[in-house]
Image (cartoon, rainbow, N blue to C red):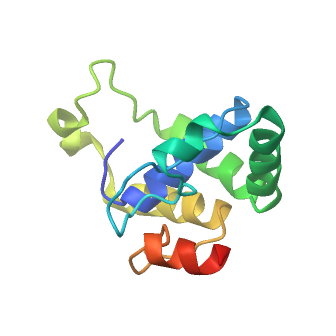
Amino acid sequence: MTLRNLEAKSARLLIHALRRDCVCVNLSDRPRSRLIFPRLMLDELGALSPSRISEMKAEMLAGLRLDQAEEADRIEKELGYFFEDGRYWKHLDKLDETFLADIDRLWMAAVGLSGRPKLPISPSREEIGAASA
């Protein structure tokens, strides 16, 4: 509905993808990212086996609070904040920021984060390298 909280929106996308048996990853080569997806290098993506992808999905699903995601989904549907043209910014007068913030908090809680997180969400390349060493 809006990109007020990119971390919450990426949590939402991650959960919707997992529900459809897909995995979202962050392929950015920037040192920091606000996206919560696991980091991979582009060359690592091509080397992923189906079994490793299944493991990644299982690891991500194990850490989710699906009750929080279901509550966020329920509130989103109840509010009806869907605009066919996708141009929510033309309908801002119809959106309640308090409800949007509540929905964002639910999506964050669903992935184990609370409030508006401090940057970065995804680890830096250096942190990834140190963890695998």
> Is 126 left or right of 111, judged from the image as shown?
left
Quadrant that contains the N terminus: top left
Q: Nearer the viewer, residue 41 or 85?
A: 41
The answer, for residue 74, to whether it is visible in the render is no
Q: Residue at x 64, y 45 (%)?
A: 15
Q: Residue furthest top?
A: 84
Q: Nearer the viewer, residue 54 or 109?
A: 54
Find residue 84 and report its image quarter. top left
x, y (%) of residue 133?
65, 78
Q: Residue at x 33, y 25 (%)?
A: 83
Q: Nearer the viewer, residue 25 or 52?
A: 52
From what the image shows, is residue 68 above or below residue 23?
below
Q: Residue furthest left?
A: 90
Q: Nearer the viewer, residue 41 or 7?
A: 41
x, y (%) of residue 78?
55, 38
> Is 126 left or right of 93, judged from the image as shown?
right
Find residue 64 and report its image quarter. bottom right
In the rendered picture of this protein, how many numbered marks are placed on residues?
0
From what the image shows, is residue 82 above or below residue 55?
above
x, y (%) of residue 65?
75, 60
Q: Residue at x 63, y 67 (%)?
A: 109
x, y (%) of residue 67?
76, 55
The answer, for residue 65, to whether it is visible in the render is yes
From what the image shows, is residue 128 above or below residue 78?
below
